[in-house]
Image: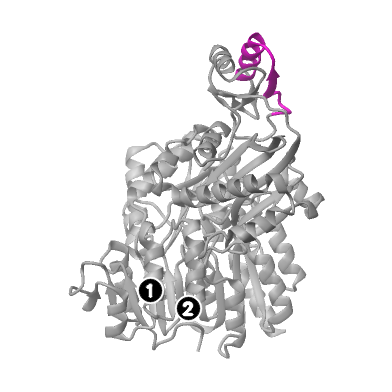
Amino acid sequence: MKIHEYQARDLLAAYGVPVPPGRVARSGDEAAGIADEVGLPVVIKAQVLVGGRGKAGGVKLARTTEEVREAADRILSLTIKDIPVEAVLVAKAVDIRKEYYLSVTVDRANKRAVCIVSASGGVDIEELAVKEPEKILKHYIDPLRGPDEKDLREFLSAAFPKNLLDRALAALLNLYRLLVDKDCSLVEINPYAQIDENTLIAADAKINFDDNGLPKHAEVQAMRTEEEYSREEIEAKEAGLSFVSLEGDIGCIVNGAGLAMATMDLIKLFGGQPANFLDVGGSSSPQKVLTALQILTRNQNLKAILINIFGGITRCDDIARGILIARDQIDLPVPLVIRLIGTNEKEGRALLEQAGLEAASEMTAAVKKVIEKAKAGV
Amino acid sequence: MGILIDGNTKVLVQGITGRDGSFHAASMLEYGTKVVGGVTPGKGGQEVHGRPVFNTMAEAVEATGADCSVIFVPARFATAAMREAADSGIGLIVCITEGVPVLEMLATYHYIREKGIRLIGPNCPGLISPGKSKVGIMPGHIHKQGGIGVISRSGTLTYEVVYNLTLKGLGQSTCVGIGGDPVIGTGYIDLLELFEADPDTRGVVIIGEIGGEDEEQAAEYVKASVSKPVVAFVSGRTAPPGKRMGHAGAIISGGKGTAEAKVKAFKEAGVPVADRPDQIPELMKEKLGS
């Protein structure tokens, strides 16, 4: 899960990392009020999750109250990469002497949290990693013993001068504490700005959370913004389904993420276009199949639906029941192709046959059939 | 032979009194797995499917001499269950549970590793040595005893591949679902090493997916250290970047973890990559014949 910069800033501040004074605003007047409070000049920044907001005109410096009002109103009227801007961060502008980069994230290959720093901050770190990898320094944290202050100080001394070392170390320890406390997948400060001889401040902040950690943190869930997921994706999540919309016209309902991806790949391989990724998950109840069909059939581009089930923890009879309930409750506007195999296959097939539905047993055959149906429907 | 489990493996089920734990304990028993008991705190003294339930793993191991544990507890208790299993001195832990927080797994991975214990999962279907023992949730009847080792990050896609192998007469020595999470106990390379050393295994199928760089590393390892035929499949060729595709680990981020890169790595290592699950048996037969 991702959150906005203003929310990330608040979390950093709560963990003792200095940030420029400021707050979020939803109108020009509100922005002007905040500017009066924190003092001019201020920076006004669009609060959207997509990157490239600076280039899209979503970041402005304002020197007078009138400029603040105008700039905020203008940014609030923007749409950046299809996302309408609904909020701006108004923060006191700071004189930046030097930009550093500081983050803590999970390195899946090394199975450890990793601290990343650079004395060349302010740029896209992934780009820097490709172009000038020697400018990026990494330090792994022992997951059982936690951070070792002596090691971290030595590590940071390669990027920060002596007079800033204490502050950088304190910030890094706080980032790690935040990462662990809230089950984050990334806590990033870029730029981590030196604003006078001895002061470092988080001039921008990004925090991502591990979705698996969310059930432990109601306060984090409360920060969820609608922007990250489509309405369908949110609805699917609430029903216990994994759903991602794509641009094709063949809807897919599959059990298991790997098989769901392989099903999409196979549709593409045989010349069709998948409309979505949908994993009904294990222990699937008939209700999940109904919800899945409801979400899929809202797609105006839909030409056919493939249900591909290989029962393991999922029982084929549960799926069959869901299909029958759905057929009673909703009007399926497109042809349905079913492939059913695995746990309780016999029971599932019997249920479908009684209702006059047939089910394939081979995946390739089912995929070819659904593509034919989709093409016939054009 | 096969690897990790055989007909003598004595299995405990952590969470045996729950819906999934109880259902799959029955299914494992039916397959012939030596399920010797289960653990659910506070339910010690009960019986499930005629097997004793214990309050703790320590008691259960002491009483049954079990050497393997399979975990079906909810995600919020999963890392505690894995650690309890590790502390009980059991040799093999299989965690089926999905949704374990990654940061908890970092510490738990190293905790278990330092004790020299093997962990499979989490977020996996478990493993099976066909005809001998099944420790997990896969439908047993699609498997057939034979000489192909299977390693997969997926659950149902593994069933799909195994079903096709069996259909074409290629039985399996052991099939291991390693799990779809970004941080898992046992990876491709650990298992390739075991399959290479297993006299019953003639060839290995790797079923990978988008996200991370484990497949690339596995490809390098195959090239350097595996003499047996290896065939691969990679799912997620049509997955859009930046979106988590069901599995927590299945995400293309910062241009890394794409299917193309994995397919390329396998091909460069001399590992044929199937475009469809039902092509895997013929590719394996070609490799075995050569």
Direction from residue A310 to residue A267 in the image, left or right: right
The magenta span reads A54-76
Q: Which mark is residue B85?
A: 1
Number of callouts: 2
Can you give x and y, in whole percent of width and height, for residue A327 in the image? 36, 43
Can you give x and y, in whole percent of width and height, for residue A8 in the image? 54, 37
Q: Does the stretch in magenta take in A273? A: no
Image quadrant where one finds the C terminus of chain A? top right
Q: Residues within 10 Å of mark 1 (few under 14, many from 20)?
A: many
Name the residue beneath numbered marker 2.
Answer: B117
Discs 1 and 2 carry the same chain letter: yes
Q: Which mark is residue B225?
A: none
**Image color mode:** one colour
Q: Does the stretch in magenta take in A66? A: yes
**Mark 1: amino acid:** Ala
Q: Nearer the viewer, residue A20 or A10?
A: A20
**Circle 2 SS class:** loop
Residue lying at 42% horizontally and 36% vertically, measured from the top left: A222
Would you identify the image quadrant in which residue A137 lies? bottom right
Question: Residues at badges 1 and 2 in contact (C-beta under 8 Å)?
Answer: yes
Q: Nearer the viewer, residue A266 or A126?
A: A126
Give the answer, above or below, for where B3 lies relative to A279. Answer: below
